[in-house]
Image (tube, rainbow, N blue to C red):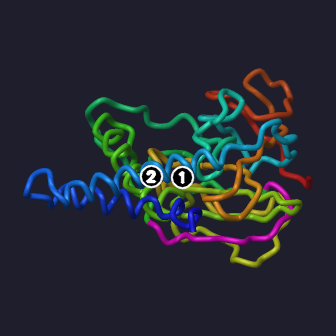
Amino acid sequence: MLLLLRKHHGLLIAAGAVCIIINSKGIGALWFTGVGLLLGGLLLRWALTRAQRPPRGGTPPVALGAPVRGHWVALNGPATKVPSHTHSLAQTYAIDLVRRPAPEPVWVWPIARRPAAYPAYGEPLLAPADGRVVAAADGQRDHLSRTSLAGLGYLLVEGFVRSLADPRHILGNHLVLDLGDGTYAVFAHLRRRSLRVVVGERVAAGQPLAECGNSGNSSEPHLHFQLMDGPDLTSAHGLPFTWRYTDDDGREQVGVPADHTRFTPAAPGPR
C-alpha cells in the first residue's frame, strides 16, 4: 500500500494544489486539507527517491556497446558526478547524448526551434547488447526546443508538472530492453513513430531500434540512456555501465565519457 502511494504521490500534490487554489474562504478546512495533501505528496516523493538510491557498496559496471554511432557529446553523465541526474526513476547513472554543432542556447530569440534544426534528431539508436523489448511507446509528439531563457523557464515548470504523472510523461517516447541477468536498458525522448521493434521482440547487439527525438521532458533532441535492475522505473535502482569509445584526443577508452567530451563509440557488441 505504501509503495502504491509513493508511486502516485503526484496525485496528492496535484489535489493539494487544487484545494489551495480554489479555496476562497481563507485559512479553513479546505486550506488545511490542501496543505496536508501537498506536504504528504512531497514527503512520499522524497521517500520514493530515497528508496531508489543504489545499495551501499555499489555494483560492478555492466560492459555494453554504445547505443549510438558517429560523433556525439556526453552531458549529465556519471563520469562527472553521481547521481548524474537524480536517484528518482533509477536515473542515478543515466547519461544524455547530443550531437554538435547545433544551435546555441540564446537569451531571447528565437524562443524555440523545430527539432529538425538539431543534428541529433532522427539519428538511429542501437541495441547495446542482445535483449528483449519489454516496454515501448512512441505516440508522443516531438515538441519545440527549450533552450532560450523563456524556454528553460517553461521547461522547469513543465518538468515539474510532468513529474506528477506517470513516468512516460518524463521519458516521452521510450523503449525498455531486458538484457538478461537482471539488467534493463532505457532509451528516452525518442522520435515519434520511429520505433522499429515491438514488445516481446528479441533484438541483437547493434540492431537499430528507433530514432533520436525530442519528446517528453527534453530541452533539445537528445538520447537519455540508463541501466537499471528491474523493469519498473518507480522501484528499480540505477546500474553503472561502460562503453568502448574514442575520445577527443583519439585515445581509445573503456568507461563513460565525461561531460562535454566529444567521442566516437565503438560498434555495439555482446556483453
Q: Tell me the distance, in whole angstroms, between the alpha carbons under discs 1 and 2.
A: 6 Å
Task: Find residue 263 and report its image quarter.
Answer: top right
Q: Is residue 134 magenta?
A: yes
Kindly identify which residue carries mark 2.
115
Tag 1: Cα neighbours inside 10 Å, few (<14), some, or many (≥20)?
Answer: many
Q: Which residue shows up at 57% across the image and 47% down it? A: 49
Q: Which mark is residue 121?
A: 1
Left or right: 125 as drawn, with respect to 266: left
The residue stretch that appears in magenta: 128-140
Q: Above or below — where is 163 with respect to 232?
A: above
Q: Position of residue 94 (x, y in %)?
A: 66, 44
Residue 230: % across, % down: 74, 61
Under mark 2, the amino acid is Pro
Residue placed most toward the observer, 254 or 250 = 254
Q: Amino acid at mark 1?
A: Tyr
Q: Magenta includes 64? A: no
Labelled disc at residue 110: none
Q: Are marks 1 and 2 in contact (CB under 8 Å)?
A: yes
